[in-house]
Image (tube, rainbow, N blue to C red):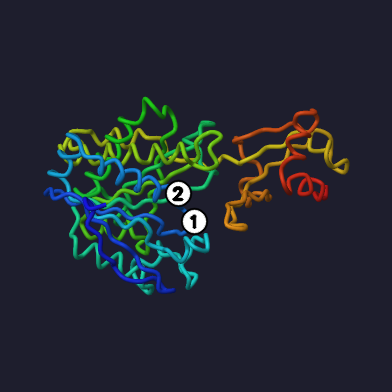
Amino acid sequence: MDFIRMHIGGQSVQGRPIPILDWGHGPSRVMMWSQMHGNEATTTKALLDLINELGKGGARASALEASVTLRIIPQLNPDGAQAYTRVNANGIDLNRDAKEKTQPESRILREQYEGFAPHFCFNLHDQRTIYNVGETATPATLSFLAPSMDAGRSVPPQRQEAMQLIAAMAADLKPALPGGIGRYDDGFNPNCVGDQFQMAGTPTLLFEAGHYPGDYQREETRYYVYAALVSALYHISQGTHRKVPLESYAAIPENGKLMVDLLVKHAEACNPALARGTSLAIQYREALQAGRIAFIPEWPEEGLTLARFAHETLDAATPQGRKALNSRSGLLSLIQGVQP
């Protein structure tokens, strides 16, 4: 792709190269990075979709090319990506290493930030299926955050601009994703990258790719992340986000943690030791098995066992429900192992 300028920013703990991609030559510099957590690949795919679309050229791409310069790190944690783990090869969560910068990947990110001097930073992640929007049963397909820069959650100019840009994106996406956009918790943590870059004076946005109904492969979510990136770049190129009132950001509902993956009703049909009318909440854990992602049923962590909503509900007392339970690896044995 000759329209992309590439160099290697450095190497991971295990010696894997970390490519840096540049595009455009406009005055507004935007830095994006993905897969800081190795098992969060949805936004990486969306970045590749963006690059592919920009590479097709045309009037819109040409206008962006003249107004923005992008610096993209598609995969900051290649060792974690290879192992499908959140942490890097040293077992460190890179998003808790921004202050100390003990890891080579953390230092590469900071070096790119300081060398590029971006006007905007996009911190791209996946979020778990436990998140819903507000108090509703709608899963948070996309969540955004303008990270805090102090414990008081003040709103200096850089954070205000990040909030306005998020609100502009949310308004653009609302017709296609009604009710599916949430706002992530803004508790301050100086060890996190977004908080650090916001503290350094750069409007920083957190993108969280969540769950779209029935889309455990996150292909629908991937599209919406791509659409959000396109929306953000056009607002930056034209400055239109600066006209958006801050109240529009505050109006985006905060995420709840009220979802589980599966609710099994009348679980006593699978395990006679259970009381009549027992419902069980089950969460899937993603794991790499033989080169593929497997969804392993487990009991939810504390606090989710009485979750209000579920992505799917099966009634074990019905033939259809029993058939579905029997067809899913490990699910029936998990229920049968419950002790009342």
- Mark 1 lies on a secondary structure that is loop
In the image, taking residue 304 as reference, residue 84 lies left or right, namely left
- What amino acid is labelled 1 in the image? Asn
Give the quarter of the image for residue 149: bottom left
Relative to 66, does residue 202 appear above or below in the rendering?
below
- Rendered residue at 78%/37% (across/down): 278
> Which residue is outermost to the top?
175
- Taking depth in this image into account, of 249 and 117 the one nearest to the observer is 117
What's the residue at 25%, 68% (across, down)?
111
Q: Can you identify the residue that label 1 sits on?
A: 39
**Residue 323 found in image quarter:** top right
Q: Position of residue 58 (x, y in %)?
A: 20, 35
Which numbered circle lies on residue 126?
A: 2
**What amino acid type should be assigned to the residue bearing mark 2?**
Asp
Which is closer to the viewer, label 1 or label 2? Answer: 1
Q: How many residues crowd mark 1 within 10 Å: few (<14), some (14–19), many (20+)?
A: many
- Answer whether labels 1 and 2 touch (C-beta < 8 Å): yes
Q: On the rendered structure, is 220 left or right of 270?
A: left
Along the horizontal axis of the image, is 277 left or right of 157? right
Judging depth in this view, the residue of 226 and 163 nearest the camera is 226
Residue, x 63% and y 34% (percent of image)? 312
Spot occupied by residue 301 in the image (x, y as percentages of width and height): 63, 52
The answer to whether 173 is drawn above or below residue 14 in the figure is: above
> Where residue 31 sits: x, y (%)?
25, 54
Mark 1 or 2, nearer chain start? 1
> Quick check: 258 above or below 29?
above
